[in-house]
Amino acid sequence: MTTFSDLGVDQDIVDALAARGIIEAFPIQEQTIPLSLPGQDVIGQAKTGTGKTFGFGIPVVQRIGLNPEPGVKALIVVPTRELAVQVYEDMDLLTSNRATSVVAIYGGKAYEGQIDQLKAGAQIVVGTPGRLIDLANQRLLNLSEATEVVLDEADKMLDLGFLPDIEKIFSKVPAKRHTQLFSATMPGTIVTLARRFMSNPIHIRATDPDEGLTQANINHLVYRAHSLDKDEVIARILQAEGREKVVIFTRTKRAAQKLVDELGDRGFNAAAVHGDMSQESRERSMAAFKAGKRDVLIATDVAARGIDVDDVTHVINHTIPDDEKTYLHRAGRTGRAGRTGIAVTFVDWEDLHKWALINRALEFGQPEPTETYSSSPHLYSDLNIPAGTKGRIKKAPTTQTVQTQKPKRDDDAPRRRRRRGAAEGSSTPTTEHTAGDGAGTHDGKGNEHHDGNPAPQRRRRRRRPSSGGAPQGGGAA
């Protein structure tokens, strides 16, 4: 076992990690920290969930010193808001025994709070490219003294088209700096990026020799499922024995919200994170999930790299991802910090070609997904679901009987009111009835004029008894 003290980490940082129960270093940390501490540029590559954040974060905190001067000394660039929050929390932990201040800079939040923290002298900035450039252009963010620069999840930043923004950011930091680049995958574009912005970097790839392209501690299950049966299958998986927190990925924002509503109706405690939600709502959902107030999180890929929760036991791909890189990042939300996990992927009939490509790239050896329904026996045995489990843990409200009786009472009441109104209308003055504008409602089926008023004959007949019986037709001729 290699401890952080063995790697030359300062005691206050060791104590901060120990307070969270983090004692032993992961392979990526064990290999990169000794190189980064003296100032060597490093490219760190390791599977998702293997401790990359502390791998670059510990050298950053230690190199800027115990009590750095006010002003930005370190910059960590991440591709998504969720990841910015996660990295910020980890850096805040590492600096908990120091005077160093950390600030998160990302979109979707008000500028004022972030600007106030910068003006207060924050030394470590964690941010997304767009908001960083925006504040730098307004001269509210000074990067001229940022001698520690980190690109986290660099492959995702390139996928999102952030390369021009990365170039602008590097033009604002000192030419002489210590640069670290970390990513789970390392395509050719990442190597090109490293050559442009780094000085003689050492590439560290932390994997076990006998391990495949996927994490060995994750059990991958692939089912060919019907779209109309997926919700029922998911609801039964959520009742598996030993199930703790679950992350479900959907392809679209609409599908995510629809699934949240469906699972909530079935009695499950689910939250959502997708692009149609405000940043504040997304952060509330993430906080509730991490705190255990919600145990099911439904997300689009925007959140795939910002969910760092140790007790996620299941990841479910409601729809298959487009490529193997996205699959690895989704599945990497479980089996973190050395734990075991289960990744379930549903493949629609029209998406079989996508699974063929992922299967070939990740060497699963399962070219044909298993045809699966909510009643399939192998679903119960694969996922340890108790026999007889159904897809609902809360009964739906039964108000149908009450609703069918109400319309009948409502229909009767207006008819009685109309009859009373007709009788009362006969006592109103004649001039009020004959002053219509000609736009009546007569349909030829009743004793009404074209203006909608009762016929004059009825009014004369009803007034005759009130005259004391005197004849009205003849008179003195």
Image (cartoon, rainbow, N blue to C red):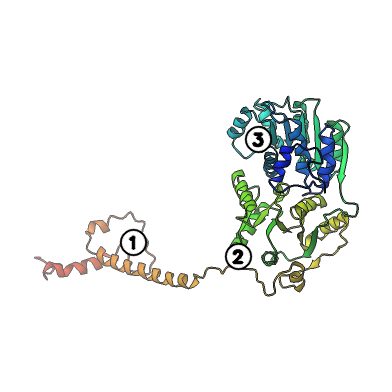
Q: Nearer the viewer, residue 251 or 283?
A: 283
Please indicate, yes or no, whether residue 34 appears anywhere in the rendered image: yes
The image shows residue 319 at horizontal and vertical percentages of 74, 58
Most foreground residue, 108 or 215: 215
Left or right: where 156 falls relative to 278: right
> Considering only order in the chain, which callout, 3 or 2, is on the residue closer to the N terminus?
3
In the figure, 167 relative to 353: above or below?
above
**Which is nearer the N-term, disc 3 or disc 1?**
3
The residue under label 3 is 103
- Amino acid type, label 1: Gly
Left-right relation of 294 to 405: right
> Which residue is drawn at the image coordinates 76% and 62% (left, top)?
348
Mark 3 and mark 1: Cα distance apart in space: 74 Å
Please give the residue where the numbered disc 2 appears in the rendered image: 266
Q: Secondary structure at mark 3?
A: strand
Tag 1 secondary structure: loop
Task: Mark 2: give few (<14), some (14-19) or many (20+) Cα within 10 Å.
Answer: some
Quadrant of the snapshot with the C terminus: bottom left
Give the amino acid at mark 3: Val
Q: Callout 1: 10 Å neighbours few (<14), some, many (20+)?
A: some
Contact (CB < 8 A) between labels 1 and 2? no
Number of numbered discs on residues: 3
For mark 2, give the secondary structure. helix
Residue matched to label 1: 452
Task: Give x and y (percent) for residue 52.
Answer: 78, 44
Give residue 126's quadrant in the image: top right
* First in sequence: mark 1 vs mark 2: 2
Other-residue count near label 3 (Cα within 10 Å), few / some / many at <14 / 14–19 / ≥20: many
> How far apart are the alpha carbons under marks 1 and 2?
53 Å
Q: Height in image: 312 above or below 113? A: below
